[in-house]
Amino acid sequence: MKYAIGIDYGTESGRVILVNIENGDIVATSVTPYPHGVITGHLNNRTLGKETALQVPQDYLEVLINSIPEVMKEINPNDIVGIGLDFTSSTILPVDENLNPLCETKEHENNPHAYVKLWKHHEAEDEAKHLNKIVQQEQWTKRYGGTISSEWMLPKVLEIANDDPPLFNQVHLFLEAGDWVISKLTGNLIRNSCSAGYKGTWHKETGFIDNETLQKISPALNDIYKTKLQGNVQSSGTLAGTLTKEISVKVGLHEGTPVAVGIIDAHAALPGAGVSEPGTLVMVMGTSTCHLLLSDKEVLVPGISGVVEGGILPGYFAYEAGQAAVGDLFAHFLKNYQTNFETLSDEAKILHPGQSGLLALDWHNGCRTPFVDTTLSGVLVGEKLSTTPAEVYRALLEATAFGTKVIIDLFEKHEIPINQVIATGGIPNKNNLLMQIYADILQKEITVVQNDQAPALGAAILGAVAAGAYDSYSRAIRHMASNKTIVYKPNKDNANIYIQLFDMYKQLSTFFTEQSSIMHDLNHLKGEKKYDRKPMEHLQ
Ligand SMILES: Nc1ncnc2c1ncn2[C@@H]1O[C@H](COP(=O)(O)OP(=O)(O)O)[C@@H](O)[C@H]1O
Ligand SMILES: O=C(CO)[C@H](O)[C@H](O)COP(=O)(O)O
């Protein structure tokens, strides 16, 4: 029996799976929660900005050192054909000449800018707005729905250049954390095409932003792609190199084991969920939800995260859209009410659509698609003295489904066909109420992959292909991807009520984005900088 290892670096933990490459059976799984988790509020004794979300790079190595031996307990290292890895993105860190993280030095241990900035670190909004003003007329921005997000590489780099020039000057390279882990595994520095394409504005023919534009954005960015952002971009899933002696000893594998170039976590879930052709929307539902879709054609859809040729699988344009808080939003609510999913779901299940009189906007971590604005915030309308926690919980579940309907409608309006919707990630198998609500609101069947590890499985598939165990992604996907599913069908009566509620959801979102500046004014009163209103005409 031969196996591939898939490693999935999510927001809270890293998961390692061992996969039989002939039939895709996951024979062992190990989860390592990041010892330092997501750092918010304080770093050592220093108070952090409210939107700061940091991580500790050593935690990623802990995942390798703990979880690889754990899945290898019964297995001979000779039987491992290859390793694939996916990572949240854009999650970046500054390193020195030896690729060592700057936060590991005494000098910078209390400096937040020296740490990993997680994808959901939202402090670079000013930088993103500034950058967007300069590049918004350029044709290439349309591939990114018209807006560069503050979650991405350049705004985060610019945040450091603006806030801490001495540290910025000391940085040798800024790396995606996934590329940093690959460098630790193989000794090779490679920038993966998936992160570079979706989060780094790289295009396989035209490359990165030209230097003239970079200088207009900020003198600090002069020649940045030849200096702090240098490095070859290589296609995700091709061979990055082989395990070094140093790391192979630590994880109990053979030196020389092939390792694939990394990919973004959500994007890995598409092959992991068994998709190798256009027309199937894959919703990767976890801390956030990412929506991935293959197509034969490139359509410039406003408000999406991006469309990248070959972004996931060679030969297809791959679209990404997203919602920045889904599981995170539910967790936030549970924490505030000191309750749990089971209790709330039991109570929320017996409510009828519309019964509570509540309606929510799911923007508690900003809105990714279609408004690309991390400064937007959540809303709940209709609350009364008689409102129960289960009613609010159900309204939040519904709000995330309405957010997904906005995304599906956007794709369909731009004539990108969606014939099937697949749900995967950590949530769908844990919450059947949520999945039924999605079927009712989207008025589509939802196929749930009976495996929570689609990103890790997708990474293992890339590892097997990079190692030469399969000669094509489609063959590897056919053999290795999940094929056990359950299907949620829409309930007509519920769907009819949700049509009316969805109309109100859209009115509410139009109000808070176009007709009223209340949300942004609230930020202003809190002492945050006032951001320019974004023209919304492009979304009409
Ligand atoms: N029963 C549940 N219903 C809805 N969300 C859940 C449930 N259990 C856990 N979650 C959410 O799932 C998210 C974690 O998703 P997961 O896919 O495992 O991790 P990651 O997003 O880090 O890849 C958390 O935000 C958590 O609140
Ligand atoms: O932007 C992303 C993908 O493009 C992030 O990686 C993603 O939103 C975080 O993933 P998760 O919710 O699974 O932790």
Image (cartoon, rainbow, N blue to C red):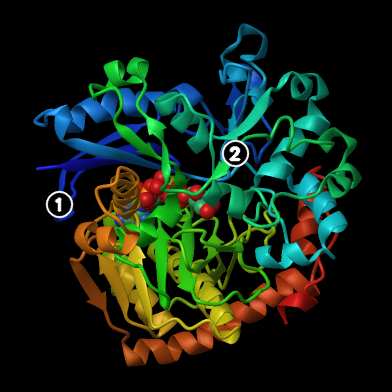
**Quadrant of res 371:** bottom right
Q: Which mark is residue 159?
A: none
- Compared with 386, 191 (above or below) is above
On the rendered structure, is 293 left or right of 452? right
Q: Quarter-wise, where is residue 117 in the image?
A: top right
Left or right: residue 203 compared with residue 449: right
User: Which label's residue is closer to the chain start, 1 or 2?
Assistant: 1
Q: Give coordinates of residue 255: x percent, y percent.
A: 29, 22
**In the image, is residue 201 above or below residue 1?**
below
Which callout, 1 or 2, points to the residue nearer the camera? 2
Q: CA distance from mark 1 to mark 2?
A: 34 Å
Identify the image quadrant of the N terminus. Answer: top left
Residue beneath the point at 55% across and 56% down: 324
Q: Which residue is at a point 38% across and 73% down the rendered structure image? A: 277
Q: Secondary structure at mark 2?
A: loop
Q: Residue 260 location in percent, x, y? A: 39, 41
Q: Nearer the viewer, residue 14 or 33?
A: 14
Helix, strand or loop at label 1? It is loop
Give the class, few, some or many, for how many residues have Cα within 10 Å of label 2's Cα (few <14, many ≥20). Answer: few
- Residue at numbered disc 1: 25
Q: Residues within 10 Å of mark 1 (few under 14, many from 20)?
A: some
